Amino acid sequence: MRAVLTLVVLMIICGALVADERPSSSPKPGLPKKFTAVDTSRLLGSPDPLPLEAERMFAKLQFERPVELTFAPDGSKRLFVLEQKGVIRTFENDTDENDAEAERAEAFLDLRDVVLSEGNEEGLLGLAFHPKYAENGKFYVYYTAKPRSSVIASYQVSKDDPKRAVRDSEERLLVIPQPYPNHNGGSIRFGPDGYLYIGMGDGGLRDDPHDNAQNLDSLLGKVLRIDVDRPDEGLAYGIPKDNPFVDLPAAVGRDGARGEVWAYGFRNIWRLGFDRKTGELWAGDVGQDRFEEVDLVHRGGNYGWNLREGMHDFLPNTPGKDDRYIEPVAEYFHGEGQSVTGGFVYRHDRLAKFRGHYFFADYLSGKVWTVGRTDDGGIAPKREAANTGLQIAAFGEDADGDMYLCAFDGHIYRLRERDAEVAAEANKFPRKLSETGLFQSVERNEPAEGLMPYELNVPFWSDYAVKDRYLALPEAASVEFRDEGAWKFPVGTVLVKTFWMHQDRGAMAKPRRLETRLLVHRREGWAGYTYVYDDAEREAHLINDGRTVSLEIEHGEGKESQTFYFPSRADCMACHTKQHGFVLGMETPQLNRVQNYHGDQENVIGMFGRLGVFKEPPQKSPDDLKRFPDWGFGNFDRSGPANRNASVADKSREPEGDTETLARAWLDVNCSMCHRPDGIAPMKRDFQFETPLEKMNVVNQPIGQRRRRPPDVRLIAPGEPERSELLTRVSTRGPYQMPPLATHYIDPRGYEILRRWIAAMPKEKAGAGGAEPPR
């Protein structure tokens, strides 16, 4: 592989990058002479506006970290809310009858004296009422206790007061030791068969260090199924005879399998939910590094953790997928959220369009998705239904099956349909690039008046594609310039980026337009859209889901097929993270460069200043501002005559700067949107350019999955590229590649520069240690 990479590096760095680019029909002017506002209003709606929004319920009530809402099957209208610190509260749910709001929620059971809630995932976590609660008054709770353990216990309601439980009626059914304060699971549900199902996390820390999830001798990382009515001898509960592993030792010769286990291979189930119509059991399982998942839980099923995460191998060197692992029915990357909250299959009539859909959410992003059924009974792709902005800790149901959300702002919410203008908004959104108003001619690649061209010093690696970039603004003096960090842009801003692929890579000729991506600042936030060109490149059409195309590429040794991926809207926002300010590349070190634009040359920041883009102009000249080195590849070549697509390329294209500067710039551009102290990536690595090397938390640091890699492997081993996991991630493709999205091919120049940088580091160089936070 080294020889192939070296050959491609030489082709890019030293080869002639002559662009044989098709001319347009007429010459066009160079850089804009004055600022022209662009009407971007037609892009400020949405092609698929979210159909639901959150509305607050029970306005007079507020709870402390509510983690569960449920009802008692006794014919009453009472709802019960669990507070994580250890209190169950109850109130009358009579809103729908007389528009009255509950005045207060009374304490039904207070366990704060015995509940351990030192860790963020400990506390009072689960509540389930016995199916015959109206007759026997029994209910069951799941809580964490000292010494650190998970307790499943039964309690009795007071015979004299249905709003009070008998505090000293506790009977403990199970006490499961917990090694760490996280991954407690905690969801308990009675199934349609009358048995109690218990969702257990893997015990905590990272990577499941004790291999609990795959160990049938452990109750951790499992869904358990027990009989609370017919205890076995020596137990406070019974083990149903049809549990899948009751007879396992006799069947396969393995000792020690626990009969309570119903399914296994889970990381941290949060939450379980039975479909009240079909009886199917759904679960949200919280991921670790990259993917969150939703599972349909089947008898005896193995859901893969800690060998699988979502639909992917957990580790780079994991053997091929074992067919025994059951794949999730839905997943999402950590760009969309970082902690799944499982919900319910909706069976109420209030949201009739969603009847039969499973609802789930992300605790951190506040997004809510649904998963429906296809005509043949399969699972349809997940669809975003709402973006609440809430920390949704749980979904709940009332006796009628209507659905509620428990949020950590202390309030209870419900989802409602948005107004009738939603459909009209969708119909207005441009489905063709020519309808956006951003181009005078899509066919000739002629931008509309007012679009301002720009280039970047170090473009993001996109599988050999080069990019043609423009900025559209609704008004002058509206951009907040910053010497450091991302610039701020007004609502109505649109960034236009067209991807070209040279079909002759040896001569860097025959460029083909593949797609134009728009990043739009809507009132609700930033959104990304992908328009894919037809074969004739006369028009580009909006896509929703991701799409792959095969390209025929010429090079010095013949032709080869190359896969290229057009991102979905969710994919776009996986990289354009909130922590990075959503906009990538629009920052001073990247834009401080002279661009060559059809006969005109000017510093990009200087051009923006001349056009009056900034609220306050920079206080320094471009020579005194920070600047990344010129990477020499990735910008569409616009240096030739006025013809839009004709140019004579610079044949040198050598990257500027020393190896360390180039390496740090590459890491900043390709990795820091996730790897930063407040980023979505685990382990708190910091790949920002300005971060001192010793504070990056990578030099001489062990990798997260250190148990399944040679013990001497480090993220960066100074002087030893072959022992550096960073270089392994960059030089391979698969579930643990870097960058994680938008690329199927190794960046040969990036790889070579990182290799030289690591090889040149003194071996005695030490990095600052860093604790590995659990998740």
Image: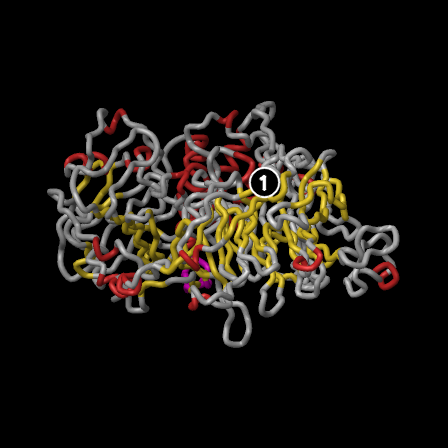
Mark 1 Cα shell of 10 Å, populated few (<14), some (14-19), many (≥20): many
Could you say which quadrant of the image residue 455 lies in? top left
Q: Nearer the viewer, residue 421 or 165?
A: 165
Is 598 one of the magenta-colored residues? no
Is 552 one of the magenta-colored residues? yes
Which scheme is used to colour this image of the protein? secondary structure
Q: Which residue is mark 1?
A: 84
x, y (%) of residue 680? Answer: 49, 41
Q: Nearer the viewer, residue 86 or 210?
A: 86
**Residues in magenta, as a range:** 551-561
Asked if residue 449 lies left or right of residue 11, the reply is left
x, y (%) of residue 107? Answer: 58, 41
Q: Amino acid at mark 1?
A: Gln
Residue pictured at 60% horizontal, 40% vertical? 87
Q: Nearer the viewer, residue 184 or 654?
A: 184
Query: Where the C terminus falls, by quadrant?
Result: top right
Asked if residue 430 lies left or right of residue 132, the reply is left
The number of discs equals: 1
Q: Nearer the viewer, residue 160 or 651?
A: 160
Residue 540: in sight, yes or no?
Answer: no
x, y (%) of residue 295? Answer: 60, 59
Asked if residue 694 lies left or right of residue 483, the reply is right
Q: Is residue 426 above or below residue 711?
A: below
